[in-house]
Amino acid sequence: MKAKDLKLSELMDISDGRLELKGRRLVIHSMNAFAQLRRDLIENIGWEEARRIFTRFGFFSGQADAAAMKRIFKWDGPDELIKAGARLHSIFGVTKSSVESLSFSAETGVFSMELVWRSSGEAEEHVSEIGKSKEPVCWMLAGYASGYASLCTGINIYFVEDKCVAMGGQYCRAAGKDEKSWGNGIKKFLPYFQAEDIKSKVQFLTKELKQKTLLLEQQEEKLGRLEKAPQDAFIEVHSKSFQKVLDTSYRVARFDSSVLITGETGTGKEILARYIHRNSMRSAGPFIAVNCAALPDTLLESELFGHRSGAFTGAVNDRTGLFEEADKGTIFLDEIGDISPAMQMKLLRVLQEKEITRLGENSVRKIDVRVIAATNRNLSEYVSSGKFREDLLYRIRVIEIQIPPLRERIDDILPLSRFFIKKFSKKLKLPDLRFDSACVDILQGYFWPGNIRELENAIERAAVLTNDGVIRPEHLPLSITHGASILNAKSSPLSIPLSQLEKNHIKAVLDLCGGNKTKASKALGISQATLWRKLKSK
């Protein structure tokens, strides 16, 4: 889990009269009320004691949130856990917090971090109710950061604000260090984190403050790059491997060179082909997709090239082929590795000559079409074994783009899942559909042999099964929860060959489905034919 992936709706449990953050009851309050309380405390007990109260309140709140984050998620290292505190501040609406620098060594105990707070509600309300200040006033923010970092690291960390909007700055800034690194510079700030001098003065107040915590209106930052395109477009892309695929696709889109897209079943080859077409000079023209493996040769030839009336039994009318229909646009030849040698020869001629001949005719027809092909086969091996023509491979593989499987794009699993949640929320009329945070590690720890198609099917199944709009682990297919637990319990996927992981998973799914291959193929998000081929190769 990464800090940037935290999402408020997946952390909160909301019902009438109760608001919880994974077991911790929360109360929504106005920052203006805190500002009024601040003014009363300053006027009655003085600036220093008021600062102490708010600093300690923030410190306790930060410790509680850090404990929850450690308990709920598996983090991609200690730095991500520490950064999550700043992310929580942002999604809770307290301030727009950004981590400018972070360095921590568990061995030496040396900690250094710099935070920038923009739109600090604490500073803005202070100015509104009390006026400008000669000193920093983000006391709760500094206390929260100190308490959060202290619990995460197990050592005393103190944040000191040195720039504040209340002092006339454009933003607020605080530095955090371990006590030893601060040296004598922290001494004058330590009393704000201690309670000895105020217990008797504010006993009535601290009892009330313990029941309250900061939670403002939802205010999320959009992550990554959103495609301004239809539903089949790519959404947020976090993984470097797939970002490279998109960058390459965007560069080649404006040229008419033939493209071969390779990758496992379900990785989104057709979606990438549409992305290339949409960004090409042919985007105003048609995009025609053909599954070459779905039809026998005779029907495939008729589909691609068209036929004349009477060309074969049942051909009662002339028919335009898909190559002609795709004129001025793009034709996508999916599963091209499954076509016969005879069909390969005919297709090669079309690509070379840029013309087709309908079945039953002798005249040729010129075409202006860009060809994008796709396969989950290793065509180079097919060429070596004589199953695929080498000259055709060279013709369709001017540019080859390989889509990585979903298990190699772990950073994309969560944004993809959220995309499908939005999709099925609209499709199934479930406006409050969301994830429970317990699903995150399961989804990111699973092998995904069916890739994006399997993920989409799993989210739809879970959405249908939920009765309160919250997708929990028990709503996910057993193959996923079981497969993720096997990987987490036995060993890291890095230590197991890809082929063995796939075999283990297929066997586990078959066992869970009682040997029923139809159920197993649905659970895996692959066709029965694909499952049969994989079983045969075991």
Image (cartoon, rainbow, N blue to C red):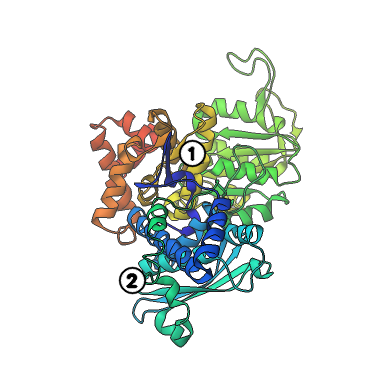
Spot occupied by residue 92 in the image (x, y as percentages of width and height) = 51, 52
At 65% from the left and 46% from the top, the residue drawn is: 276
Spot occupied by residue 145 in the image (x, y as percentages of width and height) = 46, 66
For mark 1, give the secondary structure: helix
Q: Give residue 470's quadrant in the image.
A: top left
The single residue placed furthest to the bottom in the displayed view is 184
Q: Where's the C terminus, which quadrant?
A: top left
At 32% from the left and 34% from the top, the residue drawn is: 520
Give the residue type that dot 2 points to. Answer: Gly
Query: What residue did someone put label 2 on?
Result: 154
Q: Earlier in the sequence, mark 2 or mark 1?
A: 2
Q: Which numbered tag is attached to residue 338? A: 1
Q: Is residue 367 left or right of residue 507?
A: right
Give the class, few, some or many, for how many residues have Cα within 10 Å of label 1's Cα (few <14, many ≥20). Answer: some
Give the residue type that dot 1 points to. Answer: Asp
Position above or below: 142 against 245: below
At 33% from the left and 52% from the top, the residue drawn is: 499
How far apart marks 2 and 1 lie (CA) works out to: 59 Å
